[in-house]
Amino acid sequence: MDNLARYLARGISAAGLCAMIAGLPALADTARGAVPFLTLVGPSESVAPGSDLVVSLMVANPGTSDVAFDGPPLLPAQVWQDGQSWPVSLKAMPGSRAVVPPGGFSYRAYMLTLPPGVRGRLILEISQNLPNPLRAAILVAPATGGTAAPEPVSAAILVPKPVALTTASTLQRSFLDHFGVLDPVYFIYGQKAPEAKFQFSLEYRLLSFDSDTTEILSGTLQFGYTQRSLWNLKANSSAFYDTSYMPSLFYQFRAPAPEPGAGMGNLAWIGVQTGYKHESNGLGSVEEHALNTLFVRSGYLVGRSDRWHAIVAVRVFDYVGGLADNPDLKDYRGYGDLQVMLARGDGPSLNYTGHAGKNFDHLTSQFDLTFPIKFRLLDFASYFLVQYFNGYGESLRDYNKPSNTVRAGLSLVR
């Protein structure tokens, strides 16, 4: 991540950064030698003359401690072409203060209106009170459409940058930015068979229906995939006991994150998901179990996200396509589930997930207790996880059989 961050940004001094952005919290932990990097990222495709477009101010943290990043609401800038310049203003799009972890990066989107009648290759520059200006190239198409032919730009305007900067930025926008977290990712182990349990999960953004930034993700169409396996490690063949495959397709609206400084007791709507989910264990025999559901899920945040807070999420669903493999599954799964998480900022958290069956007589509960841990050699977030399960259907193979077990291990996403 350190290498990627360096490709994505040009370095400036912490003093220069604070001089540029009035009111911005200090980004550099000078006592520890942590100097953040900034870069200005322009659009990857040509734009129309005089149009509104989005550029991004990106910050990378190569240090060893978190830094706060809160871009200013308005940035003065200039647009250059062949020695001529036009003053412009970058207006911040709605967003919230971010905390950039060591080796990570974040960015804030700004809206820019181009000068009318100017086309060709332009250079956007932010230089006020900076020892080294930030610059980004913008390609403006002719008024009749199409792609503008490249025009020569004065060498005094451009600052040489590695080709890897453009490559990494394109990779970030077209590939990495489309992936997200759907469900927890972990590997845990216990004494009762099946001893091991692991899960991985992701979501991929297929479509964006409105303006879409890291701070505010409005309407999007997402493909999700979660896979959960129970592994009988003590068996002679160390066979997998059961695996659930869970692809999904859903519409998601994620509300803006509340400001960390909001008052205690504050209630904030997180967003909503609605769509289709399939689940099966793929055994292809009498032990084959499968179900299809249409669901709606929504949640709320109570308290300050940077201090003690709670998240309450409710999901309701209905079965579609029949349950030939397991006609009584509704008796154990019911028509919804509840999730409640209590956490202190990015510190310890306790998460409860439960459902009670169709007639509220088959209670199933799972508790996940996590503590952040750091490995000197591993450059990613990790947590120590203790999980307690008590109820029915830890796997589809045993959807109607009660069990209880405790496992512990490593979680990468909670």
Image (tube, rainbow, N blue to C red):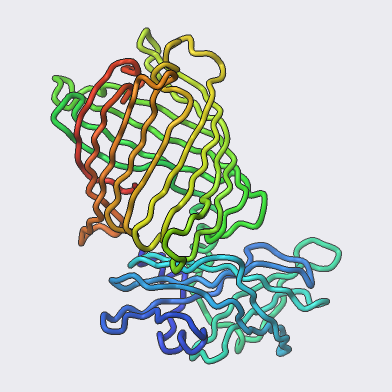
User: On the image, which quarter does residue 354 sit in?
Assistant: top left
91 to 45, vertically: above or below: below
Counting from the top left corner in percent of width and height, residue 32 is at 26, 80
Q: Nearer the viewer, residue 284 or 181?
A: 181
179 to 120, vertically: above or below: above
User: On the image, which quarter does residue 154 sit in?
Assistant: bottom right
Q: Nearer the viewer, residue 102 or 125?
A: 102
The residue located at (17%, 20%) in the rendering is 237
The residue located at (44%, 83%) in the rendering is 12
User: On the image, which quarter does residue 327 sit in?
Assistant: top left
Left or right for 388, reference 400: left
Left or right for 268, reference 206: left
Counting from the top left corner in percent of width and height, residue 40 is at 55, 74
Counting from the top left corner in percent of width and height, residue 213 is at 57, 60
Counting from the top left corner in percent of width and height, residue 344 is at 32, 58
The residue located at (77%, 78%) in the rendering is 115
386 to 215, vertically: above or below: above
Q: Residue furthest right?
A: 144
How many labels were placed on the picture? Answer: 0
Q: Quadrant of the N terminus?
A: bottom left
Q: Residue furthest top?
A: 286
